[in-house]
Structures are given as structure tokens and as C-alpha cells.
Image (cartoon, grey):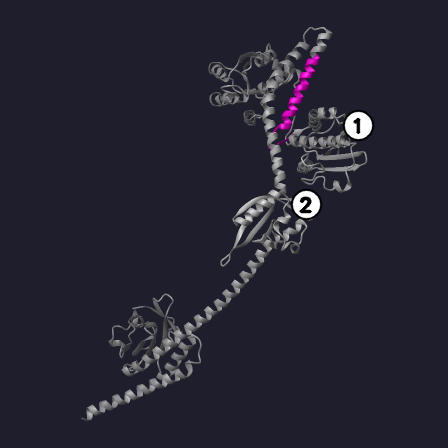
Amino acid sequence: MRGPQLQLDIELQRFYSDVMQSLSAFQRIVATVNKKSGVKAICEEVVGILSNELGLDHCSIMLLDESGHYVVNEAGVSAKDVTKGEPSLNRSFKIGEGVAGMVAKTSTPILISDVDQDGRFLKIESAVDIGSLLCLPVCSGDRVVGVLNLSHKRRNFFSKHHEKVFSILSVTIGHLVTFVCLQKDLEGLNRDLQQTIMERTREIEASHEYLKNIFENASDIIFTIDNEGLFTFLNKRVEDLGYTRDELVGQPFDSLLISEEGIRAFVNVLKQGGRKTLEMELKGKGGTVWQTLCSFTPLRNSGQGIVGLLGVAKDITERKMLEKKLLQTEKLASLGTFVSGIAHELNNRLLPVLVYSEILQESSLGDHELKLIKTINRSAMGARHIVESLLRFSRQETPSKSYINLNSVLNSVVNILYYRMSSGAIELKTDLDKSLPMTFADERQIEQVFVNIINNACDALEERGKEAGEITIRSYSADGEIFFEIANNGPEIQKERLGKIFDPFYTSKEVGQGTGLGLSLCYGIIQEHGGDITVVSEEGMTVFTIRIPVIAAGGYASHPVSDSREMGKAEERRDKKRILIVDDEEDQVDVMTQILKGRYAVTGTNSGQEAIEKLKNEKYDLIVCDVRMPGIDGAGVYEWIKEHRPPMVSRILFSTGDTLGPKAEKIISRIGNNYITKPYNAEEFLRKIDDILTQDEHLPNE
């Protein structure tokens, strides 16, 4: 009996010792851990007390990571690694692997009295001698949040009594850790909420300020009116009409309307309460009138239905003026098409007159007959210049600068406006510098400048009435710049108008007599050319001065005049050259044949199809082809030659009486300078032929 009693006494004594030891550690933990606020601090306090109270060689708390797949050491103490001199603490276990991983997976404590006798123990490479261990799940409710690892170098150190006591401790640790984490999350959420509230408040304030800026700085008048048609709100833009917002709030909207039709239209919108957009004239306080596009939208209240209208009044005064200008531009475009067709016919008719009158001047005629022929030739040349001027004036094309003589451009404009000046008893005086240098400019745009300024001078002189009008135009150059002075002795331009004269849409003319765009366009054109326009005006004299810089065309060079030896070689070559003339009008073929006969072997045909048939069977050194023909036109002939006779592409001379038509423009853009405009004289035609034939002596001859 003594043996079993002694064993029982030993067990009771150990139970008492284990429990008291565990309770002592528990008591210290409870007494101090509530003073800690962070998870790591709590874990470090627990492992420190357990290690000191129990004399453990190793004690650690491992917590689940964010993925939930590993338990990672959060805090621990252990003996130093004798080889490295560092704690063996930075460890982790995958759930289900090792003792810690198995406890985390099963949520069941593992007590190993003798690690050498238990195969579940995963040996760690360390100098620490572990004899027994106790691993407990750290839980919060039913959820495992980590494990508590306790180990001692002595075998059979841990007992079931330790397991029971420390199981309660591990649960307590689990609740504390969870509480601290929740508290931390709550604090974070609270900070985030406060930050979100502050950000939303700033956004609302910024949105309010943004909307306020939109309303106050909008280019349109924004307003609201109630169901009685009275203003309840207006933005600052209404001040452009001369009113303050306070003046109009409470006043009826239709008090700003001018026409009865506009008032009726507004009343209908107010009654119907729907969306509507109307063109309306609004009257300003100082008598100004705005052409506006007013859009109305119902304002709704969830409890009261429609409580008024939101209105936006857009100023379309300038748009209306531009629409009128566009209409005028369309008329000019139509004029260009009309002039193009007429020019083609006139130039075809003028060609025989010019050429035959030149030929007849070389024949044996009496003085009287020769004088008549010269008169015919001069008249035909004059008609030619008029047609050319009309074509240039009505041309609709993109800006294109070239090397030009501005005196020639001015003379072209004078030819157009000569009839107006002569019929209005306006005397024109010109003093043009014959040595005026050429410059790189857009001929069409410079023409427009001259036309607008001279037309304005005519308007001013006609406005004056009885006294004889006079326009004086002078050109000169100085310091690398070209100057044109266009003066008239019309009424003085008032000083307050001089500062606005180049402003868009500014005009002193009555409604319907001018758009106010002419001088503004002139100013823009000259500015784009690097120059400027100025004006001075006094009683009896107004002078517009145009300044344009002299700009040399890059690589420009005129063709040198051939000496007698070269001319002789050209004469020799002509005897061997064969020329094919293609024109649908027999008179045109006869004229060109007359000019070329005796110099070249000439063959004529009246259609593109016939020309192609001849080209299939015969060889020619040069082709003169009309652009506009029925059936296969000049473009068709060009395409056939390009495909079947490519060496001949550079030996085509196109003749046209219409440089405006799309077909002519298309071909001219592709062939460069190989075209001649009807009507031309014999010298021009022969020079063009010779230039093409001699431009490359090494071109192959089919």
C-alpha cells in the first residue's frame, strides 16, 4: 500500500505545483496585459511572463497571416543559437504542417511529453535542446487566430494540468488579440470616415463654387422664371444688356421682347410648360438689340410639379451676320462657276481673233487696213485681260503664294473696277514705280485687298455726291519693303471711327449695305503677309497705306534668253519634230496649225478617242491637248498616255480657256507648268512649244 500511496502523493504534489505555477503565470498576465494596447505588445508581454514563470527554453505566439494559409511568429523568446548568436524566432508554418500548423488546422492542443518519442514533432535545426512541448490554439469564438508554443528541455515537463490552465489563457489571448484588432480597425474606419466626410465636404464646396463660376461666367444669359413669367434669378451676363440683376428680378420676361410674335411664342411656352427653343430679339437698356436663341426647360418640384422655367439666352447676333456673309460667299461661288463656263467660251472665240490679227499684221496691207487690224488685235487683247481679271477675282481656291508683281495685280483690279469709277465720274490717277521688285505673295488675296479699299473709296466719293471725286494710287519701294498709297478726296473719317475701322463687323453703312468685314479681311491678309495697313484721314483727303515686305521666291530663276546659235539649233530640231493637236473645236485646231505650220509637222484631231487611236499607231514628239472636250477629255488622254506611253507625259502641253474648272485644276496640279491659257498670241504659244521640246534633249523618242 505504501508504494501506490506514495505515487499518489507525488501526483498530487505535482498537480498542485503545476497548477500553482500556471496560475501564478496566469495571474501576472491578467494583471499586466490589460495595460498593453497593441497586438505585438500583448504577445510580447505574455511570452515574457510565461518564460520567466515557467523557466521555458522557448515560448512564442504565432498568428495567422492575412492570407490565412500560414501561422507566423508574432512574439517569442528562446535561447541563443550557439552557431549564429541570434534568436531562432523568425519562423512560419503552413496550416497543417508541423505541430503549430496542425494545431492551427485542427484547433486542438498538442502535448508532447517526450519529443524524441513522438513522430509528429518537426525537428528544427537549432542548438536549443527541446525535451517536451505544449502547443495550444489561440481562438476567438470558433475561429483560430494563432497558436501558443511552449517548450522545455526537460522531458515530461508539461502535464495535462498545464494544458487545461493554458487552454484558458490561449482563449483569453485570442479574445484580446481579436479585440485589439477590431479596435484598431474601428479606429481606422473612424479616421477613414472623418477623412471621407472632409473630402466630400470639400468636393461639395468645390462643386458649389464651380457651378457658381459656370453660372456667373457663362457666355449666355441664364435665368429662371416662375409660372407667372416673372424673373426669379439671372446670372451676371444680363449686365451686357445694360440691366442689373436686381432691376429684373420680379419683372416679366416678355418686357425684354421686341416683337409681338416673340411675346406670343413665349406665352405659349409658359402655358404648355414643355421644352422649346426659339429665336428671339431681346432689347437692351441702351437701345441695343440682341439676336438670341432662347432655350426653355421646365423646372419641377417633387411635391408641386412644374414651378417655372429654366432659360438660356445665347447671343447669335454675330452668327446671323456670318450667315448673311456665307450666303454672299455662296453667291460668289456660284458666280465663279458661271464665270468659268463663260470664260471657256469667250477665250475659245478670242483665240482666232488674236492669232489671225497678228498674222494679218505681217501681211502686205495698206496703212488703213493695217490700222484696222491693229485695232482688232488691241480690242481682243483688252477683252482677254478683262476675262483673266474676272477669272482671278471669282476664283475659289485655297491660299497659294507665288512670285508676283504687285503693280500687275493692281492693274488687274483697276480693269475690273474701271467701269464703276468712270460711270461715277471718279477720276483715277496712278503713279506706279516701274522698278517695283517682285515678291512672294498670294495674288488672289492681294487682289481682294485692293478691291475692298478701292471700293470703299468709291463708296465714300459717291456718298459725297456733287463734287468730282478723285482716287490716287501710288506705289514705291524702300528698305526691302513695298508700299501702296490709295488716297481719295472723300469725306473725313471721324477720329472715333479710325480706331475701329479694321475691327470685324464694324461698319458705318446702313443695314444691308455692308457687313463690316471688308477692311477686317484686308488687315488680316496683309498681317499674314508680314505687313500692315494704316489709315490717316483729314478734311478732303483719306489715305490708306499698305506695306508688304519683299520676299524672294526660293530658287526662283527666269529662263535665260537663247543666243543665236541656240536658236539655230532649235530651228534645225523643228524640222524633225511631229506635233499632234487635240481640240474638239475645228477653229482652235486651225489656229494652232496656222501658228506651227512651216516649223513642225502638225497633225490635228477633234476628239480624245481619235488622239488615242493615232497615238497607238504613230509616234509624236509633242501633244497639244485641250482640257475640256466631250467624250474622252484631256484628263482621259493624259491617263492613257501615262499608262501606255509614259515617256510622253512630260511632252504634253494642255491648252484651256478655263483655269477655274475642277478638271483643269486637277490636271494643272499634276503637270506643273505644261499648260497655256487661251487666248494666247503666236509668240506665247511658240515659246511654250519650244520650252517643252528643249527642256530635256535626252528624253527618249518613241
Q: Is residue 470 above or below residue 289?
A: above
Name the residue located 71 percent from the left edge and 8 percent from the top edge: 369
Q: Secondary structure at mark 2?
A: loop
Query: Where residue 122 appears, x then y in whole percent?
Result: 29, 71
Task: Tell me the amino acid under the disc marked 2.
Answer: Thr
Q: Secondary structure at mark 1?
A: loop
Residue 249, numbered circle: none
In this view, the residue farthest toward the bottom is 2
- Report which residue position mark 2 lands on: 288
Q: Residue at x 22, y 91 (%)?
A: 6
Stretch in magenta: 374-402
Residue for badge 1? 468
Q: Nearer the viewer, residue 313 or 653?
A: 313
Based on the displayed image, in which of its 4 quarters is residue 115 positioned?
Answer: bottom left
As drawn, 649 above or below 360: below
Is 5 or 396 nearer to us in this picture?
396
In the rendered image, residue 266, in percent from the top left (x then y), is placed at 58, 47
Q: Quadrant of residue 571?
A: top right
Q: Position of residue 391 (x, y in %)?
A: 63, 25
Q: Is residue 638 left or right of residue 529?
A: left
